[in-house]
Image: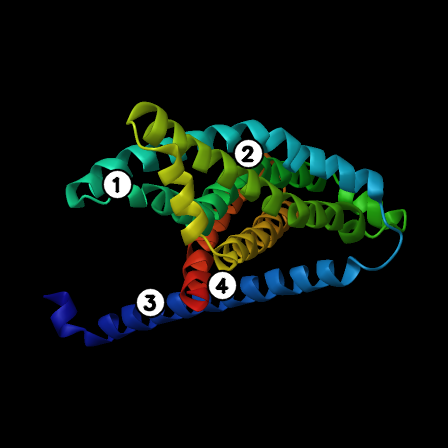
Amino acid sequence: MIDRLNPSRKTTRMVDLLQHMGARTLGLLQEMGRMFLFLLEVLAAIPVPPYRWTLFLRQVHFIGIRSLFVIALTALFAGMVLGLQGYYTLSRFGSEAMLGPAVALSIIRELGPVLSGLMVTGRAGSALTAELGIMRIREQIDALEVMGIAPLKYLIVPRLTAGLLVLPLLTALFDVIGIWGGYLVAVRLLGLSGGTYFGGIESAVEMHDIITGLIKSFSFGVIIIWICTYQGYYTRRGAEGVSHATTSAVVMSSVLILVWDYFITSIML
């Protein structure tokens, strides 16, 4: 009853709502701008000496070698599931001979890059964010600046270059193990001819499919390291800030991987 007699209150609430939405939108745009500037600064610092090979190799070991087990395990069971589900689906249409191409193309073009990126995000990306966040709250990054060492060159460049190298290699490993997992189910378990399985893959898979998967994995490497290092580098003070940054990094990287995968797939079909 009061609201009916006082329409100015409704107007005030609407104005407050619009102001809140506008502030959130502007804040989001500012954050996106900071993220892109951060990425440009890191990319510009890559060719500038000195080149810290020790730090680079250490990150290759951390991001790549220590992710081998989870990548191999995920690839094996992803290929086995594709082989099992694909066999019973194709058998309804009498097309069991197409199982090999179905498994290979699904893994090479989509599942290999995407699942590799998601696994690396969960295992290594979260750790990178937490590591940089702890360095920030302990003022170690500020100490590097005081000593005249560029933090982006020292901390971010080795991680980004390692991610660019490692993600395509992990994706290639995922593809091989995933196709082999499909072979185990299709040939060893369900009795499909091995020649039919691999012959179909040889005739169906083209270099364009392989290049598409590698381009995706390369871009996912940029996304993972970019988002995770940015969130860690600009962590707010305190342990709660590190926790929030780690969660945000994993969620943003995972979502952006899926969104970017759609755009690349639509372009390179």
- Circle 3 sits in a helix, a strand or a loop, which is it? helix
Residue that numbered label 3 is attached to: 17
Q: Earlier in the sequence, mark 4 or mark 1?
A: 4
Residue that numbered label 1 is attached to: 96
Q: Of circles 3 and 2, which is in front?
A: 2
Q: Where is residue 189 shown, x and y percent of the image?
A: 31, 24
Q: Residue at x 55, y 39 (%)?
A: 120
Image position of 167 (left or right of 150): left
Real-space Cα distance between discs 1 and 2?
Answer: 36 Å
Seen from the viewer's position, the closer of residues 13 and 107 is: 107
**Residue 75, relative to residue 53: is it above or below?**
above
Q: Earlier in the sequence, mark 4 or mark 3?
A: 3
Real-space Cα distance between discs 3 and 1?
Answer: 58 Å
Seen from the viewer's position, the closer of residues 233 and 51 is: 51
- Circle 4 sits in a helix, a strand or a loop, which is it? helix
Tell me which amino acid carries mark 1.
Answer: Glu
Residue that numbered label 4 is attached to: 28
Q: Residues within 10 Å of mark 2 (few under 14, many from 20)?
A: some
Q: Where is residue 235 shown, x and y percent of the image?
A: 62, 46
Q: Residue at x 49, y 63 (%)?
A: 28
Q: What is the number of callouts on the image?
A: 4
Real-space Cα distance between discs 4 and 3?
Answer: 17 Å
Residue that numbered label 2 is attached to: 123
